[in-house]
Image (cartoon, coloured by chain):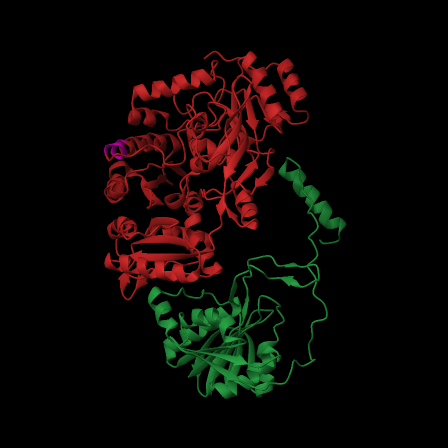
Chain colours: A green, B red
Amino acid sequence: MELLVCVKQVPDDSVTVTLDASGKPNLGGITPVVNAFDTYALEMATRFKEANGGNVSVITVGDLKENEKSLRSCLSVGASTAITVSAGDADAACALACGIPAAGTYDVIFCGSESTDVSAAQTGIRLAAALNLPVVTNVLALEPADGGLTVKQETEEGYRTVSVPTPCVLTIVKPAYDPRYPTMKSKMAARKIPISTVTVDAPAASDAAKCVKISAPAQRQAGVKIQEKEAADAVAKAMGMLIDRKLV
Amino acid sequence: MDYQKLTPELIEQLKAIAPGRVFTNGDINEDYTHDEMPIYGKASPEAVVEALTTEEIAAVMKLCNEHHIPVTPRGAGTGLVGGCVPVEGGVLLVTTRMNKILEYDLENFVVRVQPGVLLNTLAEDAQKQGLLYPPDPGEKFATLGGNVSTNAGGMRAVKYGCTRDYVRAMTVVLPTGEIVKFGSTVSKTSSGYSLLNLMIGSEGTLGIITELTLKLIPMPKANVSLIIPFPDLESAIGTVPKIFMAGLKPQALEFMGKEIVISSEAYVGKQVFPREIDGVEAEAYLLVTFDGDNEEELEAISEQASEVVFDNGAIDVLVADTPALKRDAWAARSSFLEAIMADTKLLDECDVVVPVNQIAPFLVYVKSLEDEIGLTVKSFGHAGDGNLHIYCCSNELEEAEFISLAEQFMEKVYIKATELGGQVSGEHGIGRGKVSFLKDSIGETSMALMENIKRVFDPNMILNPGKVCYKL
């Protein structure tokens, strides 16, 4: 199968982002990394390839120079081809919807379920809609089945097994395993792989969803410390507080 | 030594010196009776004083010296040799509320801090200024005063040195209550005996540090970590000198056996270190970090290091080059002690340091004691500087029997380390738990010199009695 993983470069999510005086995110000095959910998608695609054969490609939207390090990082942990889509001001889903058919033919398109910078969780489902492909969101595992795939989907109540024909789009959540580390040999090999660019004339950002305002999250209020020395007194006080707030 | 007990009148005087911050009897937190190795004995102070200023500490010392009241200084209590346990009762003088970073001097690359600032706090704050405080002991929530008092080392010691190399000056309250300043911000000196260096590593036996001026360096711009699995411990350790001979200067160079990696990864809930590569089982690992000016430089260094380790039997080289991969790679290493403690009912520990070329034979000997003595042995350490952390553990024995076997174990371990040209402690100190072993290692004359130095500083022997250089 031809497997394509859509990746986005985001600021390192372990760093707290502050807003500057004009209200814009202050990203100076924060290391750009591949979105964590996209790394889960790449690892899942790579494991699928190792078990069932096929090829894994990665695709991103934006300037090659700005994204090269992230793409080479993907090439060192399972991908064998990398593509950038140059699409002017188009948003990611529109750019990918134009760029993917121009780049090749794929059986399964993987997206992280969301990105760690804006967490909008839009790209996978809007891409599927634009390409008129079936989509399964929040996927934890997949295996081949007649004419398509059987996937394990995470739901709010638990898990659901879904059959889906290929080609299709899957959005991936954190599976039980972690992405692999690159090895020295795989990194050196990744440096030699050419990265292609697909230039498309995609529609500008749609107004289906637009950013209205960026604000810092509210500060958490200080908690209440229960400092009774005896366990029984502490439990009684805690229970009293829960009852007062009608929580039990 | 004939010490006096605190009277109600003396306690009132302490309360006048530190209003609202003197605790007695049932108000004393149980944590104040021990450090992280209670096996070396617990003891309650008669009073705890949580100091805020140099002057308060001077007043407490003057009062206690006049009345022959023992005083034990304490930081965060993260020590591993019973150094802050108030074995003679008296006053426990706690510095954790003296926790302010006072001033950065960016022209001289120094920072002034109070002794109760935590290592983690300074490391994070300095990073925001684009600076690195290089000492990096495993326990990030120790106080800087405690780090200086034990000359703590840590992971980066192999390239940057230990805490001693980053202390420029300090304010000290002597046991008599006098306030003195040792050192200055200058980078070299030939001005008499270095009292500054005498204080560093003196474990709170000569004076109480109340302010520190510490050296910083510009933060290296980039770093990369390599996880290097080996088929056996000998080839992992044997590779260490080859890395240095190739002209490589790792910022950190740690070795670890398979068992402790499995245990620690189970503790942190994430597997990073590969167990098997192309059918070859990994029995030991090196975890190496290099720092540099840019990523191209680090790529070249990583390639050179890979050639060296492959030539010496490495099975693979995994590259941690993103913040998440580096965090995960070091999370397991940083949790070794906690993982051992979580798995173990009773344990004793030593942190001997041996010449780098003696690490492998020393570890083989230590492992052989497992059967001979009948205790489980776990070890890891700083391969780059020969500082080894060795734990003997038991989940079955009663405490008295364990202590007896652990003493036999430690005696043999220290004798062997001394034979190989090693020293009793690389970074944890001597405290209360290792005094006899230090005496066996360095001899009576050196011990007497140390004790006599203490008497010059502390004529009434009231400060941290029974630690480092003599037993009570």
**Nearer the observer, A164 or B366:** B366
**Residue B416 included in the magenta stretch of the image:** yes
Residue A232 on the magenta segment: no
Question: In the rendering, at what x and y percent does residue B154 appear?
Answer: 42, 42
Question: Looking at the image, can residue B440 be seen?
Answer: yes
Tell me what residue is drawn at x 46 percent, y 36 percent.
B187
- Residue B274 visible at all: no
> Which quadrant holds residue B423?
top left
Predominant SS of the magenta segment: helix
Q: Which residues are magenta?
A: B415-419
Residue at 61% in and 59% down:
A17
Q: Nearer the viewer, residue B264 or B251?
A: B251
Q: Is residue A200 above or below residue B49?
A: below
From the viewer's perspective, tell me whether residue B161 is left or right of residue B43.
Answer: left
Q: How many marks?
A: 0
Quarter in which the N terminus of chain B is drawn: top left
- B173 over A141 or under it: above or below: above
Quadrant for the C terminus of chain B, please. top left
